[in-house]
Image: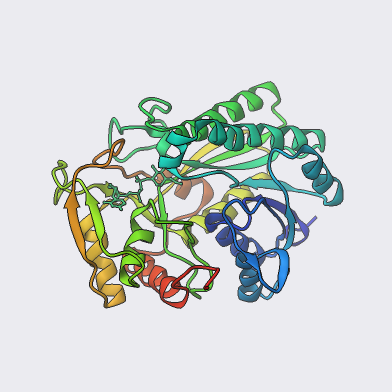
Amino acid sequence: MTSGSRTVLVTGGAGYIASHCIVELLNEGYQVVAVDNFANAVEDPQASGFPESLKRVEQITGKKCIFHKADMNDTQALNAIFQKHEIYCIIHCAALKAVGESVQKPLEYYKSNVGGSINLLMVARNAGVKRFVFSSSATVYGNPQYLPIDEKHPVGVGITNPYGQTKYMVEVILQDLHKSDAAWDIILLRYFNPVGSHESGRIGEDPQGPPNNLMPFVAQVAVGRQPELKVFGSDYDTKDGTGVRDYIHVVDLAKGHVAALKKFEKSFGLKVYNLGTGQGYSVLEMVEAFKKASGRDIQYRKVDRRGGDVPTVYGSAALAEKELNWKCEKGLDDMCRDLWRWQEQNPKGFANK
Ligand code: WQD
């Protein structure tokens, strides 16, 4: 079988990370079956039941993407998908992802992110599909004990919210699964802070309600959807007192998934890779870079620290570079320029009402 005829199941397929992954997969000649429950997605007004984001993915790539509406906890629906398509491997991005909300609704988060993952894994196992890429997060590292964080850094200590716990728990489940049956090939991708959008400006991050994350918030200030940015904490021990993170362009991140899939050509077990740039930027540096890219002023005000935040996080992606032959090609100006293109062309996101 050539890679061109291989079918990749992408869960959370209508979402921010997955839709960018699907562009790269289609460009590389993979077939894609996307699944999403529309918890966080907008329908194409002309084709109900099909996500607007994937309609645009098809326009960008000139290729078709198969879509099924299903929840990860719906065993029957998942079984039907695995019966209908010959799945080569799974990229599992489906999850609830709002950190603050996870503190309010822990049961919903554990059910969706942990329960949903277990259900998907059982259905996959029963169908004989044992190649799995998991969308994990640098949040599993907790408060860094050293920098840059590499994959040997301890995990599971000092995670401050249920969302982060769910990512850690699914990692543990996958480790145990692999120990029980070496036929599983599993890749855990620990993302740092994904930002930006596809350079077409046609797809991007579309938060429902006020954004929790820095860059979508900054972009909404630039178009007047939010009055001002609150900078959470200006007394950290960092270059300018504000929090430092490792922001990675979402297209680089998506290409990291395709690089990971190539590892499945030979059986290799369970592997963990950081996907980041190795470079940290402060909140104020991000604001300045976005001002430059957009030509808009960004009003901001320094306020108290946000609970659960740590001063500085950045990772080493040396292992991914060495073993996946992958490395970030895009820098801060690209991230800001592409985010701005998406925000300016779609001031209200996919709904554009
Ligand atoms: C970045 C910096 C804030 C908003 C979180 C999750 C993580 C992952 C990504 C994903 C920090 C500051 C932010 C604002 C601000 N989750 N900030 N004003 O906290 O590194 O990671 O999102 O699905 O699991 O923990 O990202 O973008 O929220 O914050 O000053 O309005 O920006 O304090 O220093 P974070 P972030």
Q: Is residue 153 left or right of residue 351?
A: left
Residue 131 falls left or right of residue 295:
right
194 to 76, vertically: above or below: below
Side (left or right) of 180 relative to 159: right
Q: Residue at x 70, y 60 (%)?
A: 30
Q: Closest to the observer: 331 or 15?
A: 15
On-image quarter of the N terminus: bottom right
Q: Position of residue 319 (x, y in %)?
A: 45, 43
Quick check: 299 above or below 180? below
Please tell me which residue is depicted at 36% across the width and 32% down the height of the picture: 142
How many numbered badges does the structure rendering display?
0
- Considering depth in this image, is 21 or 316 the residue closer to the camera? 21
Residue lying at 64% horizontally and 61% vertically, measured from the top left: 25
115 horizontally vs 348: left or right: right
Position of residue 180 measured from the top left corner of the image (x, y, whole percent): 68, 21
Picture quadrant where residue 329 is located: bottom left
Work out whether residue 26 or residue 216 is closer to the camera in this orientation and state it: 216
Residue 326 in percent (x, y) is at 49, 54
Q: Position of residue 310 (x, y in %)?
A: 27, 38
